[in-house]
Image: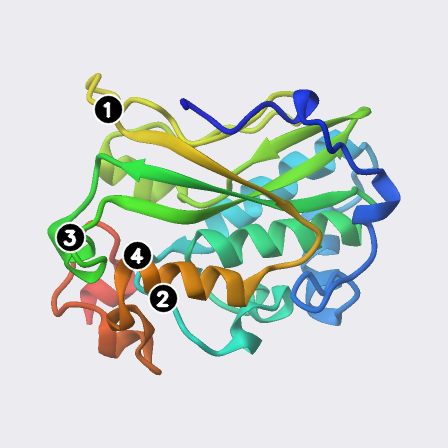
Amino acid sequence: MSSPASSAESPQQGTGTDYLAPGHFVDSDSPEVQAFARRVVGDETDPIAMAVRLFEAVRDEIWYDPFGLTTDPAAYRASAVAAGGSNWCVPKAVLLTAAARAVGIPARLGFADVRNHLNTPRLRERMGGADLFVYHGYTDLLLDGRWVKATPAFNAELCARFGVEPIAFDGRTDALMHEYAGGGEQYMEYVNDRGVHADLPLEEIFVTFREYYGEAMFAADPAESAPAGADAFTAPAAAER
């Protein structure tokens, strides 16, 4: 499959009210998420424009760090993600989902397995040699009467390092990972759709990660399980230390 099935074609649409309430991880009623959402949307009141602002803020204000995996459930709450400067795709999707609900936009979490053809040796080592990212996280937002997918994972500065355009979201069409990089080489390939959830199925994700990647992914301190050195995923401040 080249991408998850279109939300408009999904047999399980869900209603807007199903995806407005706070969850344990999607804690849209927390002061941290409320403050983040208010700051980002400002005086904007149009749902599509608010969604675009929130998407761009989560995408670019939080550096994508695939080495930030932790087993601490508290770290996956949107309120904790909002307070951090870097994270990986699933927590970033949790924050976007919560921030959308905080401003009255129905939103849910979606997951898919993607094959990343632009990897780094350091990340491949961390993943036990695999190039399949299981449970890649994105956000599904109900805008203008239809569900629209958006993945805020890769920040614009990181995309520039890999020579790809950052994912743009207009609030009307799905904004998923690019299939091809700027030079025409294959970039991301969606291979399995894992459906949508009102809240984060963290234990389910951890079980699947252990099956695919082994226990090396689950050091108590994320820094302990990351291979030494830096690579294209390393945030500038960390690279300078």
Q: Position of residue 50 (x, y in %)?
A: 72, 38
Mark 3 or 1, which is nearer the eye?
3
Alpha carbon of mark 2 to alpha carbon of mark 4: how far? 17 Å
The residue carrying pointer 3 sits among few (fewer than 14), some (14 to 19) or many (20 or more) residues within 10 Å by Cα, namely few
Name the residue located 30 percent from the left edge and 78 percent from the top edge.
Answer: 219
Q: If you read the primary sequence from the N terminus, does the residue marked by circle 2 or circle 4 appear first?
A: 2
Identity of the amino acid at label 3?
A: Gly
Which residue position is annotated with label 4? 212
Q: Quadrant of residue 69?
A: bottom left
The residue carrying pointer 2 sits among few (fewer than 14), some (14 to 19) or many (20 or more) residues within 10 Å by Cα, namely some
Q: Position of residue 95 (x, y in %)?
A: 61, 56
Which residue position is annotated with label 1? 186
Which element type, helix, strand or loop, lies under badge 1?
A: loop
Proximity of marks 3 and 1: CB atoms separated by less than 8 Å: no
Name the residue located 43 percent from the left edge and 65 percent from the top edge.
Answer: 207
Q: Position of residue 183 (x, y in %)?
A: 19, 19
The answer to whether 78 appears left or right of 31 in the picture is left
Asked which colour scheme the image uses, the reply is rainbow
Disc ID at residue 68: 2
Identity of the amino acid at label 4?
A: Tyr
Q: Is residue 35 visible?
A: yes
Q: If you read the primary sequence from the N terminus, does the residue marked by circle 3 or circle 2 appear first?
A: 2
Mark 1 or 4, which is nearer the eye?
4
Q: If you read the primary sequence from the N terminus, does the residue marked by circle 1 or circle 4 appear first?
A: 1
The number of numbered badges drawn on the structure is 4
Farthest residue in the front direction? 211
Q: Position of residue 128 (x, y in %)?
A: 18, 59
Farthest residue in the right direction? 17
Q: Is residue 235 visible?
A: no
Which residue position is annotated with label 3? 129
Name the residue located 62 percent from the left edge and 64 percent from the top edge.
Answer: 78
